[in-house]
Image (cartoon, rainbow, N blue to C red):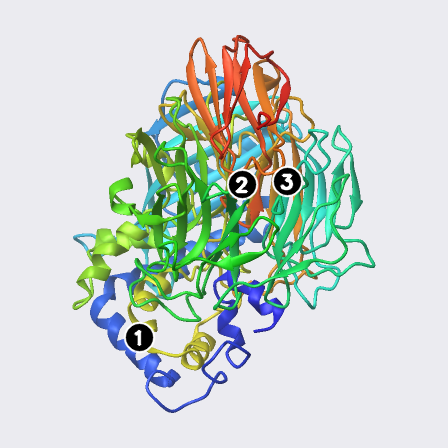
């Protein structure tokens, strides 16, 4: 497979368009003959299967495509200043908007109202007048989305849908933000061969408003594309790390061969990762850490040639001109998705676990909830000098090494002071492997969590409930279509297990709170964090300095030229039928789908910022806090770039697309890294404290735990890698303190067992921390 297409694997359909290329297998699109290769046979199978098993969903699909999609597309096409007029022009007979409750005031200047059913019934004329009041008040509709949550025929035979909606508007140069989210019951008029809303009734909703300064301010957009887009048209690896020990973290973009040297106050000086006369291989995945024990950060990455390379660190923070080649082992590096580093056997050097993903249309798993048919994940043991050997089987990790992995981290999950392994995979979810202290692992997934299942894309680790133990949150795909099918009871015969797992896998994200002894359980507030969309990279930080950890995530899979969504095809066809067919038949089948090159797949989703409610739950205030972007994003890193005690954000916008295949068109829009300064006034008014772990020869920060002790209690943080999508966070940990500045102590436990304690450290500053001398 060529380099660009290997990268496109992350867009879910990249492998499909490479049918005849190296490593793709299966010949060329349109080839015939043999079971599973005939596109006509696939079409006939789909038609028969849907007619028998999904007749109601086919009706729902038609209503969505003819009723909801035209409204959403018109709003997408309209200029922002014209969108309220477009909304006001939606045809209907009657509309009941509901009744608003009393305002509730929250932290960060946010005011909410609950809107219940009932209220005045509006005619189209009254609705236009209602919209006009918002126009006269100066509001612009900046975003809307509409999701078909349920469908049925009522007693009279009329088509009835439940539609989840979001409307987000601003005025006063974006400093007054207003958001409505809720659910509508829509009865459709199908007369005259057209579908339009007849009666619309609000079932439930809420309004949210925030007035005031920017919470996050865009400081720059760094173009992240490869200088030679014919090689790899993407941002590639993102790492944020303090390379020169001045506590200011640098920004590394692997595919662009860029280091942005941090000069303070959001001033960055660009330079190459490798000098222009050096040997450079652009990288999709990379990690900064000291792999040869000389106390200098190295750059470990994949290459466009499908192998691994290690650039040794040099004094001052740069890297050597010529890398050391690293052999993966018996499997080829095809679609690398993460590297995580840690000293798993306590021999004083960093070992590496490498994850790979595999496209669903390269091969659909036989069991979409338990795929173990990927390209091979590998544990590499370090000999101390940066030379590695494959130890996957010897370490007890062979049984599940073919997961289609997206993220993974070495961290201590059972409080026994060695590094266990957490792996998050597409088409499965979570696997947990316990380390016995010598680098031997045992699969303890069933003992660790009750429900591991999800289409896992990334994870993030923090002490969410403020009990002094680190928890973890796994992010992935939450599907409106899967939930709609459950409500229809659309269950194909002879697929009992797949039917049962459909709602389990499509439910969304999963949060696991530490109970002690290696046991993790879902919190009571789990539904508040389960459904953020199709979610990719993620980061945890106390963005408002109130003493609890918030979560930011990247959203949106493919935002095409129309909101017409592929998702119903995935749930009604692909998971049941595609296993039997090879890529040529699948490629030809896609050519028959109407508007497939313009379609979306869970597109136009807004990035959430889940604000922690004192450890007892979360609320999504992403739009109100100025980071609710609705373009497709992937990478996320949280880091305090200017050391002012307010964690900032780096958000990777994926390159543009010419259609459903998300085929990486920089001429449409180049990939870019948004650098966002945290300017939240409430965060500036509160106290905080932080540490920057710098390591020493033979002792890495990777896997270290930091425990904060204050009069109010204990909180814990962990330094790790491999968690966010193709991104690495720095070895910098920040704790918000709220109104109190007193800190009893900070305890840093290094992976080798050594401990550094800071007694009564001063608040409102970062403390550089090194391990004690041996």
In space, the residues marked 3 and 1 are separated at their CA atoms by 47 Å
Question: Measured from the top left, where is residue 663 in percent x and y?
Answer: 58, 65
Q: Are marks 3 and 1 in contact (CB under 8 Å)?
A: no
Question: Measured from the top left, where is residue 260 in percent x and y?
Answer: 74, 42
Q: Earlier in the sequence, mark 3 or mark 1?
A: 1
Image quadrant occupied by the C terminus: top right
The front one of 199 and 542 is 542
For disc 3, the neighbor class at 10 Å (few under 14, some 14 to 19, many from 20) is many
The front one of 473 and 577 is 473
Q: Is residue 388 above or below residue 729?
A: below
Q: Is residue 582 above or below residue 339?
A: below
The front one of 244 and 344 is 344
Q: Which residue is mark 3?
A: 240
Question: Measured from the top left, where is residue 321 in percent x and y?
Answer: 77, 55
Q: Which residue is mark 1?
A: 46
Q: Which SS class for mark 3?
A: strand
Residue 182 visible:
no
In space, the residues marked 2 and 1 are separated at their CA atoms by 56 Å
For disc 2, the neighbor class at 10 Å (few under 14, some 14 to 19, many from 20) is many
Residue positioned 74% across, 64% down in the render: 228
Q: Which SS class for mark 2?
A: loop
Residue positioned 60% across, 42% down in the render: 651
Image quadrant occupied by the N terminus: bottom right
Q: Which numbered circle lies on residue 200?
A: none
Residue reaching furthest to the bottom:
33
Q: Which numbered circle lies on residue 348?
A: 2
Left/right placement of residue 124 relative to residue 132 reads left
Quadrant of the image occupied by residue 662: bottom right
Q: Are marks 2 and 1 in contact (CB under 8 Å)?
A: no
Question: Measured from the top left, where is residue 773 in percent x and y?
Answer: 60, 26
Q: Which SS class for mark 1?
A: helix
Q: Earlier in the sequence, mark 3 or mark 2?
A: 3
């Amino acid at each position: 497979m060529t380099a660009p297409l290997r990268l496109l694997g992350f867009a879910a359909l990249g492998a499909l368009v490479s049918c005849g290329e190296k490593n793709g297998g299966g010949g060329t699109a349109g080839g015939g003959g043999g079971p599973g290769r005939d596109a006509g046979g696939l079409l006939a199978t789909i038609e028969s299967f849907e007619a028998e098993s999904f007749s109601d969903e086919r009706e729902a699909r038609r209503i969505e495509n003819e009723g909801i999609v035209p409204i959403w597309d018109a709003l997408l096409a309209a200029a922002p200043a014209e969108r309220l007029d477009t909304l006001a022009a939606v045809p209907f007979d009657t509309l009941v908007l509901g009744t608003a409750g009393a305002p509730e005031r929250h932290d960060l200047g946010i005011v909410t109202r609950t809107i219940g059913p009932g209220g005045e019934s509006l005619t189209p004329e009254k609705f236009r007048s209602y919209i006009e009041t918002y126009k006269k008040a100066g509001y612009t509709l900046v975003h809307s989305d509409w999701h078909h949550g349920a469908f049925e025929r009522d007693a009279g035979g009329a088509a009835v849908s439940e539609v989840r909606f979001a409307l987000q508007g601003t005025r006063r140069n974006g400093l007054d933000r207003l958001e409505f989210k809720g659910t509508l019951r829509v009865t459709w008029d199908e007369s005259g061969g057209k579908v339009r809303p007849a009666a619309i009734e609000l079932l439930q909703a809420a309004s949210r408003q925030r007035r005031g300064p920017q919470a996050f301010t865009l400081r720059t957009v760094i173009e992240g594309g490869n200088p030679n887009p014919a090689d790899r048209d993407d941002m590639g690896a993102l790492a944020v790390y303090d390379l020169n020990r001045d506590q200011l973290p640098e920004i590394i973009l692997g595919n662009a061969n860029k280091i942005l040297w941090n000069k303070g106050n959001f001033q960055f000086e660009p330079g190459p990762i490798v000098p222009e006369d050096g040997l450079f291989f652009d990288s999709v995945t990379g990690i900064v850490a000291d792999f040869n024990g000389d106390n200098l950060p190295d750059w470990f990455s994949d290459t466009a040639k499908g192998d691994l390379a290690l650039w040794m660190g040099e004094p001052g923070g740069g890297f050597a001109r010529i890398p050391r080649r690293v052999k993966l082992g018996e499997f080829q590096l095809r679609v690398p998705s993460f590297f995580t580093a840690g000293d798993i056997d306590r021999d004083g050097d960093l070992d590496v676990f490498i994850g790979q993903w595999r496209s669903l249309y390269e091969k659909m798993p036989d069991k979409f909830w338990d795929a173990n048919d990927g390209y091979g994940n590998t544990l590499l043991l370090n000999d101390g000098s940066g030379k590695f050997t494959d130890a996957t089987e010897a370490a007890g990790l062979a049984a599940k090494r073919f997961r289609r992995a997206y993220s993974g981290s070495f961290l201590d999950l059972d409080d026994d002071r060695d590094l266990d392994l957490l792996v998050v995979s597409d088409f499965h979810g979570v696997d947990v492997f316990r380390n016995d202290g010598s680098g031997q692992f045992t699969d303890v997934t069933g003992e660790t969590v009750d429900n591991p299942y999800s289409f896992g894309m990334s994870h993030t680790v923090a002490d969410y409930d403020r009990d002094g133990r680190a928890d973890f949150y796994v992010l992935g795909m939450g599907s409106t279509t899967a939930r709609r099918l459950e409500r229809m009871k659309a269950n194909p015969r002879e697929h009992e297990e797949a039917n049962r797992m459909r709602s389990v896998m499509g439910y969304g994200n999963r949060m696991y709170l530490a109970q002690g002894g290696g046991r993790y359980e879902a919190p009571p507030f789990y539904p508040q964090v389960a459904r953020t969309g199709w979610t990719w990279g993620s980061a945890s930080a106390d963005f408002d300095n109130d003493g609890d950890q918030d979560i930011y995530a990247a959203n949106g899979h493919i935002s095409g030229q129309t909101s017409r969504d592929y998702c119903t095809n995935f749930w009604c066809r692909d998971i049941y039928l595609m296993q039997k067919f090879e890529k040529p038949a699948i490629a030809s089948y896609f050519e028959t789908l109407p508007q497939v090159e313009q379609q979306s797949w869970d597109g136009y989703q807004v990035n959430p910022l889940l604000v922690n409610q004192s450890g007892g739950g979360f609320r999504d205030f992403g739009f109100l806090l100025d980071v609710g972007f609705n373009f497709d994003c992937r990478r996320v890193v949280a880091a305090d770039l200017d050391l002012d005690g307010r964690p900032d954000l780096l958000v990777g916008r994926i390159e543009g697309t010419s259609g459903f295949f998300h085929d990486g068109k920089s001429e449409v829009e180049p990939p870019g890294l948004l650098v966002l300064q945290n300017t939240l006034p409430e965060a500036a008014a509160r106290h905080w404290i932080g540490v920057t772990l710098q390591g020493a020869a033979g002792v890495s920060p990777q896997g270290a735990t930091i425990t904060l002790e204050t009069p109010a209690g204990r909180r814990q943080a962990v330094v790790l890698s491999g968690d966010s999508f193709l991104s690495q966070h720095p070895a910098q940990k920040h704790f918000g303190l709220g109104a109190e500045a007193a800190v009893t102590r900070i305890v840093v436990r290094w992976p080798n067992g050594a401990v550094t304690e800071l007694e009564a450290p001063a608040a409102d500053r970062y403390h550089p921390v090194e391990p004690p001398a041996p």
